[in-house]
Image (spheres, helix red, strand yellow):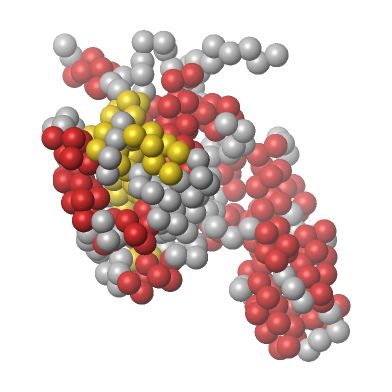
Amino acid sequence: MTNAGQQRQKDAATRRVVMIVYPDAHILDVVGPLEVLTGAKLFLPENIKPYDVHVVAEKAGSIRTTSGLTIDADQSFADAAMDTAPIDTLMIAGGHGTVEALEHQDLLNFVRQAARRADRIVSICTGAMILAEIGLLNGRRATTHWWWCPILKSKYPEVEVEPDAIYVRDGNIWTSAGVTTGMDLALSLVEADWGHDVALQVARYNVMYMMRPGGQSQFSAHLVAQKAEDPVINETLSYILANLTDPLTVTALAARAAMSERTFARKFKDETGVTPAHYVEAARVQSARVELEQSDTGVEQIALHAGFQNAERMRRAFQRHVGVSAADYRQRFRPVGAQIFAPDVDSS
């Protein structure tokens, strides 16, 4: 067989995935990424099974999650440790049970053993704490749920924590932020394994609308606007979202709020955790993302619609908040070149 033929055969091989769960894991940390991975089969030829999934826990059988629903583990740690088959992707779920899991020596020992024979090691949400506990994140960049990022940084100072990223890849170790970002990470795995077009189809099938780059911020302008308690700041946030093309300077916003610039800036950051300038830019990027995803409007025009003065300013803002340029961001939603296999479902 030629080298090209061997590569095609390797590319079409089933990837073995081992997902580690424990009591009070978050059910979305488990089923979200696995649904994304296994959903790739709908967009590949029928003879290709993209992923072979094994769920492993302390004991085989039902594991209760934070929601009260249960997940069935295929194998116990002891039985899975006897299996010497290579692991393509080792995944560790997060959830409220992570604190107890950090004290579970059988779990930690299995992660150590399985990591040695895994090509990729992935944590979902607070699963990063488990990787950090056994030293796998030392000297590496990593992220976790925004609430846990300060704890990860304090408890494991040798980890380079990136608190704003939705997922981070450092070598063969991937870590994701909270809950649904595990699905974004899983889409990136599908893209690495089966190509951009298949990953895009999986995203659309799961009504995810987009494949978010890992460097994209966990920050959401609309979510921040919902949590502000000060009525003046709350009204200011709503005004910003509704008037992105206005000159939303600190001077203009402070005058509108009938405050000094210094008082306004302090109150704004106390309520939102960010400066007015950061919030305005993030809101404009958020607006531009929607138009980039859903229209064919030119980038220059979208920049004006979103309140940026020109496309270059929008490009720099996208690099800061999303990790790619606006043009590159749009390109991620356009299938390129390869044949796309439609799922065998009725889409009428």
Task: Using the rendered image of the protein, determine whether residue 252 is visible from the camera's viewpoint.
Answer: no
The answer to whether 38 is drawn above or below residue 93 in the figure is above
Residue occupying image coordinates x 84% and y 79%: 257
Q: Position of residue 264 (x, y in %)?
A: 74, 83
Residue 242, located in which quarter of the rendered image?
A: bottom right
Residue appearing at x 36%, y 23% in the figure:
50
The answer to whether residue 203 is left or right of residue 88 is right
Left or right, 293 with reference to 121? right
**What is the count of numbered marks?**
0
Foreground of the two, 160 or 299: 160
Give the x, y percent position of residue 310.
69, 56
Answer above or below: position of 124 versus 118: below
| Residue occupying image coordinates x 40% and y 70% | 151
Q: Quadrant of residue 83?
A: top left
- Residue 185 falls in image quadrant: top left
Does residue 121 show up? Answer: yes
